Amino acid sequence: MRITPVIFNFALSTCKNNHTDYSQYRVPVLADLQKDTVCFKANRPENVNPSRKSLENLYKYNLSCFCCGRTMIPPDEITAIKNSHVLNTKAPQAIKVLEKYRNSMHTVEREVFDILKDESQKHPDYNFRKILQTIRPEHETKLIKTQFGIFKLIELASSNINPEQKKQVKELIESEKEKILQGDNKFRRKYFVNQFKAIFKDSKNTATKEHLIRLANKLPTSYENKSAFIVKYSNRNAEDIGIRLLSYSMCTIEHVTPQNKDGENHLFNYIPECMRCNSFRQDRPMIQQLEEHPEMFYNAQTLIDRLIDFANNGQLSKWYIVKIASRVSKESENMLNLDISRLDMNSKMRKATQREDIELDEDERNLLKNFKTQKVPILTKKEQTKLKIKTWREIKNKHKENKSTKRR
């Protein structure tokens, strides 16, 4: 999901915007990131500052990703490296700067970094671009073999589809093969996959259709294949290559409930996540993210344990922990239930964690929903709120009575 920087309650002068496109996302770099964070004294959730600043102030403590568990890189460190222009120098010097971030890099980025490191010893006068251009022919051959192999598998699997679709698949593949052989990155994987899916747009969901689309999605990407990475970035400047190795490990703020699904820009809807996991999730349900990354059950708890320590030390709102645990549970359809028992909670917080969710029938849901949309000119806003609370209590008492009747 793409993140748009949100700034609440603090002067614009404290934020330095990134004017560089080292990734397709822009994340604000706080000028006062190194300052000590303030203690939170809010006793009620509504008194908590909705700004994400309190989380951004924790970037410097090397938080782990909520999803993949990697130690994330603070945005200001990446910006400082870019502004120093050290990555435009000879490869051995650039390698020294990136070495400390190797363990934070994702798999492909780490593999490419190791290749650059080895090649820099053979060619100490080369920069990153010159090295990638030197090794490109070898990796281009590997990439083409993989791509053409997948095309063969698609043609074989499409033998059972109707003749018209079979013809369209063959023509599309032949067209894309020509682009690959022409070189200069003329082949666009995303374009091919979208065109391929369009052929089967009006077809029924059959096992053959799903199998064919799954094969098309196996075409190598620069995120998952080092040869694809090298071919794609061999024409970029040295600085862009170096920043690309770091940018997908950068710490960003993820909306637990996506914005286009009524997810608000509020602290209680934010969780730290690396740029790759953040952008790959997009607006999909969290349950899908768990299916793709089952290690998230452990990694999410690891991050929350760390955030609980910050909350207990007064560096983060305790209400944030209570609310985010509830939000994550709801968004994951109660699959990811975070343990927050280590949090020093007051009675209000404990009550909030122990509150049972009441299953409402359709009429009750519509009744409560009407309070949001219905305008009653006779009643004041305060009276409308009182009426809503009264209605909610009546529903709650009704459910309690039904529960006790069933027990008898």
Image (spheres, rainbow, N blue to C red):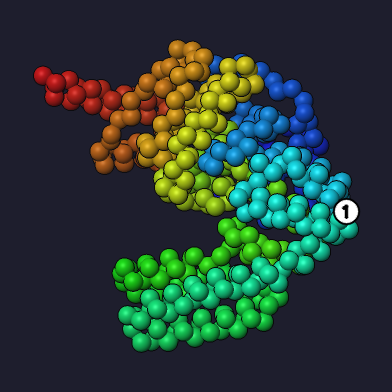
Is 288 above or below relative to 136?
Answer: above
Indicate the quadrant where residue 80 lies.
Answer: top right
Q: Toward the viewer: 30 or 178?
A: 178
Residue linked to disc 1: 89
In this view, the residue farthest toward the left is: 408
Q: Toward the viewer: 312 or 54?
A: 312
Identity of the residue drawn at 63% across and 37% down: 71
Q: Is residue 285 visible?
A: no
Indicate the quadrant where residue 120 lies.
Answer: bottom right
Image coords of residue 402 (percent x, y): 18, 25
Report the quarter where the C terminus lies.
Answer: top left
Image coords of residue 155 (percent x, y): 43, 79
Image coords of residue 379 (percent x, y): 42, 31
Mark 1 residue element: loop
- Residue kind at label 1, given as amino acid type: Thr
Image coords of residue 249 (percent x, y): 65, 45
**Mark 1 surroundings within 10 Å by alpha-carbon count, few (fewer than 14), some (14 through 19), many (20 or more):** some
How many labels were placed on the picture? 1
In this view, the residue farthest toward the front is: 122
Identity of the residue drawn at 59% across and 60% down: 225
